[in-house]
Image (cartoon, rainbow, N blue to C red):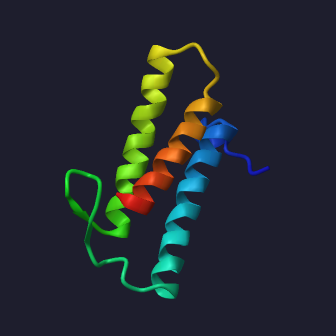
Amino acid sequence: MIDMSWMAWTPPTGLFFALIGLTLLLMARLHFMRPGGDQARPGLLFGLATTRGDRLFIVLLGSAYIHLAWLALTDYALPWAGALSIVYAAVIFRWG
């Protein structure tokens, strides 16, 4: 494992940022494989026209709120919030 002690990060924090980086790389690759992601399309979000990148931002922000609300309102394990966030992301990317 990479030594991140100089930044006082925990392995979950490093994993989180690594996954965000991989997501951005995946979105870049998707842009080259399937161009047209910069074309806005209307969706579920109050008729707001969004691009692929807009939907990614909305998913990341919404997932953060889902996790914060989960921590504040329930005593259940946090992976359930992660599962809910994945469902949320699927809905937003498909119909959002």
Count every numbered label the image shows and give the total: 0
Residue 91 in the figure: left or right of residue 19: left
x%, y% of residue 32?
Answer: 48, 86
Above or below, 92 against 16 in this view is: below
Q: Give the residue displayed 61% in from the left and 27% down from the top.
A: 78
Q: Give the residue displayed 32% in from the left and 61% down from the top.
A: 54
Residue 90 in the figure: left or right of residue 78: left
Q: Looking at the image, which residue sits at the far right?
A: 1
* Viewer-proximal residue among 42 and 68: 42
Above or below, 85 against 20 in this view is: above
Quarter of the image for the C terminus: give it: bottom left
x%, y% of residue 58?
Answer: 35, 51
Q: Quadrant of residue 52?
A: bottom left
Q: Quadrant of residue 44?
A: bottom left
Q: Give the residue displayed 53% in from the left and 79% down from the top.
A: 29
x%, y% of residue 77?
Answer: 64, 22
x%, y% of residue 18?
Answer: 60, 55
Residue 7 in the figure: left or right of residue 2: left
Q: Give the residue displayed 62% in from the left and 46% down from the top.
A: 14
Q: Quadrant of residue 38?
A: bottom left
